[in-house]
Protein backbone atom coordinates (compact mmCIF):
# COMPACT_ATOMS: atom_id res chain seq x y z
CA UNK A 1 0.00 0.00 0.00
CA UNK A 2 1.13 3.52 -0.64
CA UNK A 3 0.66 6.26 1.85
CA UNK A 4 1.82 9.76 2.68
CA UNK A 5 1.74 11.01 6.25
CA UNK A 6 2.00 14.62 7.27
CA UNK A 7 1.72 14.33 11.00
CA UNK A 8 1.72 18.07 11.68
CA UNK A 9 -1.81 19.32 11.17
CA UNK A 10 -0.97 22.93 11.93
CA UNK A 11 2.21 24.84 12.73
CA UNK A 12 2.38 28.42 13.94
CA UNK A 13 5.63 30.39 14.10
CA UNK A 14 6.68 33.99 14.31
CA UNK A 15 8.04 35.65 11.21
CA UNK A 16 11.78 35.09 10.55
CA UNK A 17 11.83 31.78 12.37
CA UNK A 18 12.86 28.65 10.51
CA UNK A 19 10.23 25.95 10.18
CA UNK A 20 10.31 22.34 8.98
CA UNK A 21 7.32 20.50 7.59
CA UNK A 22 7.54 16.72 7.86
CA UNK A 23 6.52 14.19 5.23
CA UNK A 24 6.83 10.43 5.63
CA UNK A 25 5.88 8.11 2.80
CA UNK A 26 5.31 4.40 2.27
CA UNK A 27 5.77 2.51 -0.97
CA UNK A 28 7.14 -0.83 -2.11
CA UNK A 29 8.22 0.56 -5.46
CA UNK A 30 11.89 1.25 -5.98
CA UNK A 31 11.11 3.97 -8.50
CA UNK A 32 8.87 6.71 -7.24
CA UNK A 33 8.47 10.47 -7.18
CA UNK A 34 7.80 12.88 -4.37
CA UNK A 35 6.24 16.31 -4.63
CA UNK A 36 5.49 19.33 -2.51
CA UNK A 37 2.67 21.74 -3.29
CA UNK A 38 1.63 24.98 -1.61
CA UNK A 39 -2.03 26.01 -1.29
CA UNK A 40 -2.38 29.69 -0.35
CA UNK A 41 -5.74 31.09 0.79
CA UNK A 42 -6.65 31.80 -2.84
CA UNK A 43 -7.12 28.04 -3.31
CA UNK A 44 -4.90 26.92 -6.18
CA UNK A 45 -2.20 24.38 -5.44
CA UNK A 46 1.21 25.61 -6.56
CA UNK A 47 3.86 23.09 -7.54
CA UNK A 48 7.07 23.56 -5.55
CA UNK A 49 9.32 20.60 -6.22
CA UNK A 50 9.56 17.08 -7.63
CA UNK A 51 12.17 14.57 -6.54
CA UNK A 52 12.69 11.06 -7.91
CA UNK A 53 13.79 8.15 -5.75
CA UNK A 54 17.22 7.90 -7.35
CA UNK A 55 18.21 11.42 -6.51
CA UNK A 56 18.88 11.83 -2.81
CA UNK A 57 20.62 15.16 -3.16
CA UNK A 58 19.08 17.80 -1.03
CA UNK A 59 17.80 20.83 -2.86
CA UNK A 60 17.79 24.49 -1.98
CA UNK A 61 15.76 27.16 -3.71
CA UNK A 62 16.09 30.52 -2.03
CA UNK A 63 14.61 30.21 1.45
CA UNK A 64 13.20 26.77 0.69
CA UNK A 65 15.10 23.54 1.12
CA UNK A 66 14.17 19.89 0.94
CA UNK A 67 15.78 16.96 2.75
CA UNK A 68 15.15 13.58 1.11
CA UNK A 69 16.17 10.59 3.25
CA UNK A 70 15.36 7.16 1.82
CA UNK A 71 16.59 5.46 4.98
CA UNK A 72 13.74 7.03 6.95
CA UNK A 73 11.30 7.39 4.02
CA UNK A 74 11.07 11.09 4.61
CA UNK A 75 10.98 14.14 2.41
CA UNK A 76 10.97 17.13 4.72
CA UNK A 77 10.59 20.75 3.71
CA UNK A 78 12.27 23.62 5.52
CA UNK A 79 11.52 27.31 5.16
CA UNK A 80 14.32 29.54 6.42
CA UNK A 81 13.57 33.02 7.73
CA UNK A 82 9.83 32.55 7.27
CA UNK A 83 7.66 35.36 6.00
CA UNK A 84 3.95 36.09 6.36
CA UNK A 85 3.48 35.27 2.67
CA UNK A 86 4.57 31.71 3.42
CA UNK A 87 1.31 31.16 5.29
CA UNK A 88 -0.51 28.41 3.42
CA UNK A 89 -1.37 24.74 3.51
CA UNK A 90 1.48 22.58 2.27
CA UNK A 91 0.91 19.16 0.74
CA UNK A 92 3.34 16.34 0.20
CA UNK A 93 2.47 13.76 -2.49
CA UNK A 94 3.82 10.47 -3.83
CA UNK A 95 3.63 9.01 -7.34
CA UNK A 96 4.67 5.42 -8.03
CA UNK A 97 4.06 2.63 -10.50
CA UNK A 98 2.17 0.60 -7.91
CA UNK A 99 -0.62 3.17 -7.98
CA UNK A 100 -0.36 3.71 -11.73
CA UNK A 101 1.42 6.98 -10.98
CA UNK A 102 -1.70 8.48 -9.51
CA UNK A 103 -0.73 11.13 -6.96
CA UNK A 104 -1.17 9.94 -3.37
CA UNK A 105 -1.61 13.00 -1.18
CA UNK A 106 -0.86 13.71 2.44
CA UNK A 107 -3.49 15.47 4.51
CA UNK A 108 -1.56 18.73 4.43
CA UNK A 109 0.07 20.95 7.05
CA UNK A 110 -1.38 24.39 7.68
CA UNK A 111 1.45 26.84 8.26
CA UNK A 112 0.69 30.12 10.00
CA UNK A 113 3.38 32.78 10.04
CA UNK A 114 2.64 35.54 12.53
CA UNK A 115 4.08 39.01 11.98
CA UNK B 1 -4.71 33.79 -20.24
CA UNK B 2 -2.24 31.40 -18.75
CA UNK B 3 -2.63 28.60 -16.24
CA UNK B 4 -5.83 26.84 -15.31
CA UNK B 5 -9.01 28.89 -14.90
CA UNK B 6 -12.05 27.66 -13.02
CA UNK B 7 -15.49 29.21 -12.93
CA UNK B 8 -17.43 29.99 -10.89
CA UNK B 9 -15.25 30.62 -7.83
CA UNK B 10 -18.18 30.11 -5.49
CA UNK B 11 -21.45 28.25 -5.99
CA UNK B 12 -24.39 27.69 -3.68
CA UNK B 13 -26.99 25.25 -4.91
CA UNK B 14 -30.01 23.44 -3.62
CA UNK B 15 -30.22 19.67 -3.65
CA UNK B 16 -32.61 19.67 -6.59
CA UNK B 17 -30.61 22.08 -8.75
CA UNK B 18 -28.48 21.32 -11.78
CA UNK B 19 -25.29 23.28 -12.25
CA UNK B 20 -21.96 22.94 -14.02
CA UNK B 21 -18.39 23.74 -13.08
CA UNK B 22 -16.05 24.84 -15.83
CA UNK B 23 -12.29 24.44 -16.19
CA UNK B 24 -10.12 25.85 -18.94
CA UNK B 25 -6.40 25.52 -19.67
CA UNK B 26 -4.30 27.02 -22.42
CA UNK B 27 -1.05 25.31 -21.50
CA UNK B 28 -1.18 22.74 -24.28
CA UNK B 29 -1.56 19.97 -21.72
CA UNK B 30 -3.06 16.66 -22.76
CA UNK B 31 -4.46 15.54 -19.42
CA UNK B 32 -7.03 17.13 -17.13
CA UNK B 33 -8.30 16.13 -13.71
CA UNK B 34 -11.09 16.84 -11.26
CA UNK B 35 -10.26 16.68 -7.57
CA UNK B 36 -12.47 17.08 -4.52
CA UNK B 37 -11.02 18.72 -1.42
CA UNK B 38 -13.04 18.36 1.77
CA UNK B 39 -12.05 19.75 5.14
CA UNK B 40 -9.48 17.62 6.97
CA UNK B 41 -9.33 14.96 4.24
CA UNK B 42 -6.66 14.28 1.62
CA UNK B 43 -7.34 15.39 -1.91
CA UNK B 44 -9.60 12.90 -3.70
CA UNK B 45 -9.11 12.26 -7.39
CA UNK B 46 -12.49 12.09 -9.09
CA UNK B 47 -11.89 11.91 -12.84
CA UNK B 48 -8.98 11.81 -15.26
CA UNK B 49 -9.16 12.75 -18.92
CA UNK B 50 -6.35 12.12 -21.37
CA UNK B 51 -6.65 13.50 -24.88
CA UNK B 52 -10.34 14.11 -24.24
CA UNK B 53 -11.04 10.51 -23.23
CA UNK B 54 -11.98 9.56 -19.70
CA UNK B 55 -9.34 7.17 -18.41
CA UNK B 56 -10.32 6.97 -14.78
CA UNK B 57 -13.40 7.34 -12.67
CA UNK B 58 -12.65 6.76 -9.02
CA UNK B 59 -16.00 5.40 -7.85
CA UNK B 60 -17.64 8.78 -8.03
CA UNK B 61 -21.44 8.89 -7.62
CA UNK B 62 -23.39 9.38 -10.82
CA UNK B 63 -24.70 12.74 -9.60
CA UNK B 64 -21.30 14.01 -10.78
CA UNK B 65 -20.95 13.85 -14.54
CA UNK B 66 -17.76 15.04 -16.28
CA UNK B 67 -17.45 16.24 -19.83
CA UNK B 68 -14.34 17.03 -21.85
CA UNK B 69 -15.33 18.48 -25.24
CA UNK B 70 -11.74 19.29 -26.20
CA UNK B 71 -8.28 19.24 -24.67
CA UNK B 72 -8.64 22.76 -23.29
CA UNK B 73 -11.97 22.46 -21.52
CA UNK B 74 -13.35 20.27 -18.78
CA UNK B 75 -16.77 20.44 -17.16
CA UNK B 76 -18.29 18.85 -14.09
CA UNK B 77 -22.07 18.65 -14.30
CA UNK B 78 -23.83 18.45 -10.96
CA UNK B 79 -27.35 17.30 -10.19
CA UNK B 80 -29.26 16.14 -7.14
CA UNK B 81 -26.31 16.76 -4.85
CA UNK B 82 -26.18 16.09 -1.14
CA UNK B 83 -24.94 18.42 1.61
CA UNK B 84 -21.87 16.19 2.07
CA UNK B 85 -20.85 17.09 -1.48
CA UNK B 86 -20.02 20.59 -0.25
CA UNK B 87 -16.28 21.01 -0.84
CA UNK B 88 -13.64 22.76 -2.90
CA UNK B 89 -13.53 21.27 -6.39
CA UNK B 90 -10.16 21.64 -8.04
CA UNK B 91 -9.28 21.20 -11.67
CA UNK B 92 -5.73 20.39 -12.73
CA UNK B 93 -3.85 19.70 -15.91
CA UNK B 94 -0.56 18.08 -16.81
CA UNK B 95 1.51 17.50 -19.90
CA UNK B 96 0.57 13.83 -20.03
CA UNK B 97 -1.75 11.65 -17.97
CA UNK B 98 -0.12 10.97 -14.59
CA UNK B 99 3.35 11.61 -15.95
CA UNK B 100 5.55 11.88 -12.87
CA UNK B 101 8.14 13.89 -14.76
CA UNK B 102 5.94 16.95 -14.51
CA UNK B 103 3.97 18.59 -11.80
CA UNK B 104 0.31 19.39 -12.14
CA UNK B 105 -1.02 22.90 -12.71
CA UNK B 106 -4.09 23.59 -10.60
CA UNK B 107 -6.89 26.08 -10.85
CA UNK B 108 -8.10 28.10 -7.87
CA UNK B 109 -11.09 25.85 -7.41
CA UNK B 110 -14.83 26.24 -7.08
CA UNK B 111 -16.10 26.42 -3.51
CA UNK B 112 -19.38 24.50 -3.64
CA UNK B 113 -22.01 24.66 -0.93
CA UNK B 114 -25.05 22.40 -1.16
CA UNK B 115 -28.02 23.56 0.91
Image (spheres, rainbow, N blue to C red):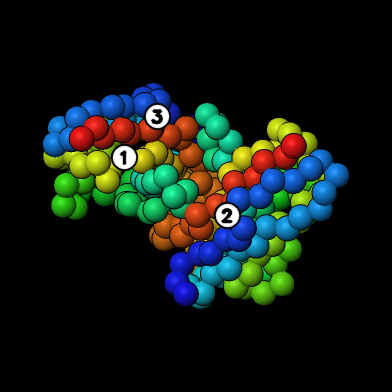
Tell me the CA gap for discs 1 and 2.
21 Å
Foreground mark, 1 or 3? 1
Q: How many marks?
A: 3
Q: Using the rendered image, report if marks 1 and 2 lie on a common chain.
A: no
Residue A77 x, y percent position in the rendering: 26, 38
Secondary element at tag 1: loop
Which residue is the site of mark 3?
A: A6
Specify whether residue A32 is in view: no
Residue B85 x, y percent position in the rendering: 70, 38
Q: Residue at x 39, y 53 (%)?
A: A46
Q: Residue at x 74, y 37 (%)?
A: B115
| Quarter occupied by the N terminus of chain A | top right
**Residues at circles 1 and 3 in contact by the CB criterion of under 8 Å:** no
Q: In the figure, is residue B99 to the left or right of A55?
A: right
Checking the image for residue B26, the label placed there is: none
Residue B61 x, y percent position in the rendering: 78, 42
Q: Using the rendered image, report if marks 1 and 3 lie on a common chain.
A: yes
Q: In the figure, is residue B67 to the left or right of B62?
A: left
Give the quadrant of residue B30. bottom right
Tell me the CA gap for discs 1 and 3.
17 Å
Which residue is the site of mark 2?
A: B9
Checking the image for residue A87, the label placed there is: 1
Foreground mark, 3 or 2? 2
Q: Residue at x 47, y 48 (%)?
A: A43
Amino acid sequence: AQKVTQAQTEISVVEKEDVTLDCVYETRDTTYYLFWYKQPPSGELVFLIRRNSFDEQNEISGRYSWNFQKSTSSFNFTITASQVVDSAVYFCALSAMDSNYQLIWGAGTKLIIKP
Amino acid sequence: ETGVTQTPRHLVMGMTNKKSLKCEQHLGHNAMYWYKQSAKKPLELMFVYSLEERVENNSVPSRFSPECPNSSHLFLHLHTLQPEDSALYLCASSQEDRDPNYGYTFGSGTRLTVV
